[in-house]
Image (cartoon, grey):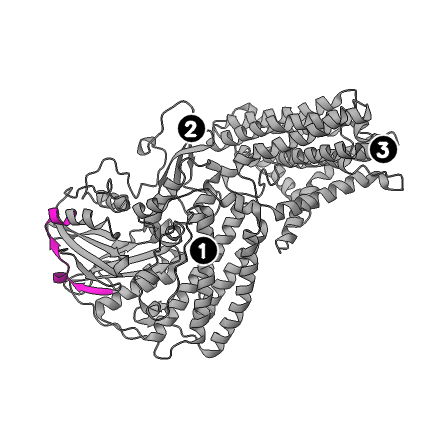
């Protein structure tokens, strides 16, 4: 019998209900469970003299989450990522806290200096050359360092060094909630404001036992889908631009702004800041605005369809995207991929479907998958999702439930664990929090979808042309600040 | 007229090239539904670059500072052999097309040398790609030249490009079309246009020509950009003389080839809007197509 406690998305558990296992049993069950579930969170917090390690796994087939914890002292955690690569980045983080001794695990958050090649793994041989890109890039993008080991134009290995954007966000949450903590969630990854703020709000709601009004849930879903639409459309434009195909690049660049403006129509901010608050939402969608939104949505639906369909009818674009940066379904499972990148490998994996909360319990959205696992697949899955989201938003706005906008959030229950997952446009955004005995946030953990997916980019580049890297990178379009926190 | 013709040729060679790049950009903007930069933007850019300070990498030597100007001078010199109008270019001698081809090669040699001089991984890759592809454009260019020489019987660039035999001869249609097509592909490659290179990209890893000049700044960059524009005019003239040998015996008709180059610039803009870039691995196939096209044209002439 499995001793782990099962619970659902956006539910809280008191400390007694999170099974405390002996380290041996704990790691043995982690090893066993990871063959059929995937890691959602795997983090430590100081508790007395030792450290408490909490694991939250998702059993997507059963639509349940599983959790257990154990107490460990320093460097007592065995390295399991050799057998379960999806734990790789979690273990790197634990190693940085000094909880895991693994000399072969590279650091997650490197100091903002590049150059010491000992940190990387060079490929030996006279013909091999190293190419270093970043952390300062040619475009106005976030900092990250890419180290390629190449022979001619072929990439033998790519290593990605991140951590330049580490802001100590998780530590800043401790002792909260206070006036600032919501804004940390809003600005954690600027393009994923709604998803992260919703997850944060759900954590607080679960910990305080707040019931969110249905209208607020509907408006959150609206915000989340508008965020997805804006970013997916922007990504399709950027992918077109990287193949050198101008028309779609220009149109989608403009249309992305129009979708952002729909968010601004409701809450006054293009990225949805200030829209979602713990307990509900801060801005309503009144009748005239709803009519205006639907009117603009109809125009945008047509324009997006026209601009994106140019891609599928231009063979030179398809030639650039097919059979590039391919990941297999097995690799996706092994790495614990999330979001469009996972669905592009044929995995049916979507928080809105597997672990639904809020509006998605009542109004389902189909999971869009494609199975070739290459750049084309990741591009095409985005287009499928755009179409599904457009329909969803249309139906949602037409049938908005009535009711209050928010409910008051009371004090947090002491010594509780809460976990909330949201399907952000990049994939699963997970927030987990432990409260202290005085009802404050004692440990706050955020796992951005990029945290799962960065390793996939390294794998996808093996044996590829180095000139295809920008396109591959764009097909994942991962967040640096979401990863670095 | 004896003095006027070389003067007009020289002034055109010096002043018109940036306009062509402006035309390409304007066309692309129009296709993308944007207003785009002003038509004269490349001129402003050049003036700006020549007024700017040069920042030099500490790893570079005198080669790096010399190379852009060798490129500029060799390109301009090559331009004196290729007719831009329907009258002969200022300079010509028997077999001058070999000099033209190798003046371009000289400029390329110095550009790649300067790129390697910086010791940067990007510029090394750019230089390697540039040389690999020029290895394929050169045979295409020469086969094209040989076909034109065979048709006209003249060994001078002005001679074979302006040969009246190029006009109105159904016997020559097939080889001329094949040669023009091959030279057009060479033109796209040599001027770093799509589908081979993307002059607008900021992604270093995909660049060819642009990767080689990442470290250039100020007047050095200006000289490289100016030479690229000039190359566009010179090779463009080569293509239009081969592809569209219209007679121009009406008043003002002498400027027809120049107008055709402008149309070519618009056409390049249309092409760049309608197609995505090739995968780098496929570029050699594209260039093999250029060699085969020019080669087939040559074979047809050898019957």
Residue occupying the point 43% across, 67% down = A392
Q: Nearer the viewer, residue A63 or A91?
A: A63
Highlighted magenta segment, given as a residue range: A11-27
**Left or right: B43 in relation to B65:** right
Image coordinates of residue B9 in percent, x first then y, are: 79, 33
- Is residue A21 a member of the stretch shown in magenta? yes
Q: Which mark is residue A382?
A: 1
Q: Quadrant of residue B93?
A: top right
Q: CA distance from mark 2 to mark 1?
A: 35 Å
Mark 1 vs mark 3, CA separation in Å = 61 Å
User: In this rendering, which labeled residue sits more in front, label 2 or label 1?
Assistant: 1
Q: Position of residue A307 (x, y in %)?
A: 56, 57
Q: Residues within 10 Å of mark 3 (few under 14, many from 20)?
A: few
Q: Which residue is mark 2?
A: A129
Question: From this viewpoint, which residue is outermost toward the front?
Answer: B303
Q: Chain of mark 2?
A: A
Q: Secondary structure at mark 1?
A: helix
* Residue at x 64%, y 25% (from the top left corner): B105
* Residue at x-position 30% and y-position 68%: A278
* Residue that label 3 marks: B4
> Which residue is found at the position 51% from the left and 25% from the top?
B117
Residue B77 seen in render = no
Q: Nearer the viewer, residue A234 or A398?
A: A398
């Amino acid at each position: 019998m499995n001793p782990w406690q099962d619970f659902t998305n956006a539910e809280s558990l008191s400390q007694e209900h999170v099974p405390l296992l002996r380290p041996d049993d704990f790691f043995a069950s982690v090893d066993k469970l990871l063959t059929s579930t995937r890691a959602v969170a795997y983090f430590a917090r100081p508790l007395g003299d030792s450290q408490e390690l909490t694991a939250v796994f998702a059993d997507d087939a059963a639509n349940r989450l599983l959790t257990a914890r154990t107490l460990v002292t320093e460097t007592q955690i065995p390295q399991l990522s050799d057998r379960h690569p999806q734990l790789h980045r979690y273990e790197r983080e634990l190693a940085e806290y000094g909880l895991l001794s693994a000399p072969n695990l590279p650091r997650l958050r490197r100091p903002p200096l590049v150059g010491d090649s000992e940190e990387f793994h060079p490929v030996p041989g006279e013909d091999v050359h190293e190419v270093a890109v970043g952390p300062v890039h040619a475009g106005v993008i976030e900092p990250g360092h890419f180290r390629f080991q190449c022979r001619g134009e072929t990439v033998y290995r790519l290593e990605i060094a991140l951590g330049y954007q580490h802001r100590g966000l998780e530590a800043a949450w401790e002792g909260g909630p206070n006036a600032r903590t919501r804004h940390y969630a809003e600005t954690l990854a600027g393009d994923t404001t709604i998803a992260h703020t919703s997850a944060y709000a759900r954590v607080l709601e679960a910990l305080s036992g707040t019931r969110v009004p249905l209208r607020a849930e509907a408006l959150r879903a609206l915000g989340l889908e508008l965020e997805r639409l804006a970013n997916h459309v922007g990504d399709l434009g950027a992918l077109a631009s990287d193949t050198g195909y101008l028309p779609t690049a220009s149109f989608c660049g403009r249309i992305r702004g129009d979708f952002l403006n729909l968010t601004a129509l409701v809450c006054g901010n293009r990225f949805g800041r200030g829209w979602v608050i713990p307990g509900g939402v801060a801005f309503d969608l009144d009748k005239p605005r709803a009519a205006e939104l639907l009117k603009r949505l109809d125009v945008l639906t047509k324009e997006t369809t026209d601009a994106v369909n140019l891609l599928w009818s231009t063979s030179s674009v398809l030639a650039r995207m097919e059979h590039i940066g391919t990941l297999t379904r097995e690799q996706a499972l092994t790495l614990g991929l999330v979001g469009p990148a996972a669905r592009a490998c044929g995995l049916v994996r979507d928080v809105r479907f597997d672990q639904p909360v809020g509006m998605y319990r009542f109004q389902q959205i189909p999971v869009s998958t494609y199975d070739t696992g290459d750049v084309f697949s990741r591009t095409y899955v985005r287009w499928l999702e755009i179409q599904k989201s457009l329909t969803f938003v249309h139906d949602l706005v037409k049938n908005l439930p009535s009711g209050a906008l928010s409910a008051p959030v009371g004090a947090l229950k002491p010594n509780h664990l809460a976990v909330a997952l949201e399907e952000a446009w990049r994939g699963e955004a997970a927030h987990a929090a432990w409260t202290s005995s005085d009802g404050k946030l004692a440990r706050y953990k955020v796992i951005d979808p990029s945290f799962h997916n960065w390793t996939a980019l390294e794998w996808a580049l093996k044996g590829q042309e180095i000139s295809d890297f920008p396109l591959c990178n764009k097909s994942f379009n991962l967040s640096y600040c979401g990863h670095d926190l | 007229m004896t003095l006027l013709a070389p003067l007009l040729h020289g002034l055109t060679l010096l002043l018109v090239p940036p306009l062509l790049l402006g035309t390409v950009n304007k066309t692309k903007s129009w296709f993308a539904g944007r207003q785009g930069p002003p038509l004269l933007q490349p001129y402003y850019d050049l003036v700006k670059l020549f007024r700017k300070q040069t920042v030099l990498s500490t790893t570079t030597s005198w080669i790096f500072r010399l190379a852009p100007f060798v490129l500029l001078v060799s390109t301009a010199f090559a331009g004196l052999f290729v007719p831009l109008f329907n009258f002969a270019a200022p300079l010509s001698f028997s077999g001058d097309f070999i000099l033209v081809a190798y003046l371009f090669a000289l400029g390329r040699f110095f550009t790649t040398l300067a790129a390697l001089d910086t010791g940067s991984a990007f510029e090394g890759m750019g230089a390697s790609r540039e040389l690999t592809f020029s290895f394929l454009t050169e045979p295409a260019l020469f086969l094209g030249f040989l076909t034109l020489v065979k048709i006209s019987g003249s060994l001078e660039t002005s001679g074979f490009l302006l040969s009246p035999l190029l006009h109105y001869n159904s016997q020559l249609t097939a080889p001329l079309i094949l040669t023009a097509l091959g030279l057009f592909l060479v033109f796209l490659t040599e001027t770093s246009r799509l589908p081979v290179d993307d002059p607008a990209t900021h992604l270093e890893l995909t660049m060819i020509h642009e990767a080689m000049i990442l470290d250039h700044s100020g007047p050095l960059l200006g000289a490289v950009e100016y030479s690229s524009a000039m190359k566009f005019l010179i090779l463009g003239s080569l293509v239009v003389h081969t592809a569209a040998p219209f007679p121009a015996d009406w008043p003002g008709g002498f400027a027809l080839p120049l107008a055709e180059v402008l149309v070519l610039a618009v056409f390049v803009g249309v092409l760049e809007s309608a197609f995505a870039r090739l995968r780098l691995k496929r570029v050699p196939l594209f260039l093999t197509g250029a060699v085969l096209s020019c080669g087939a044209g040559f074979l047809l002439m050898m019957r």
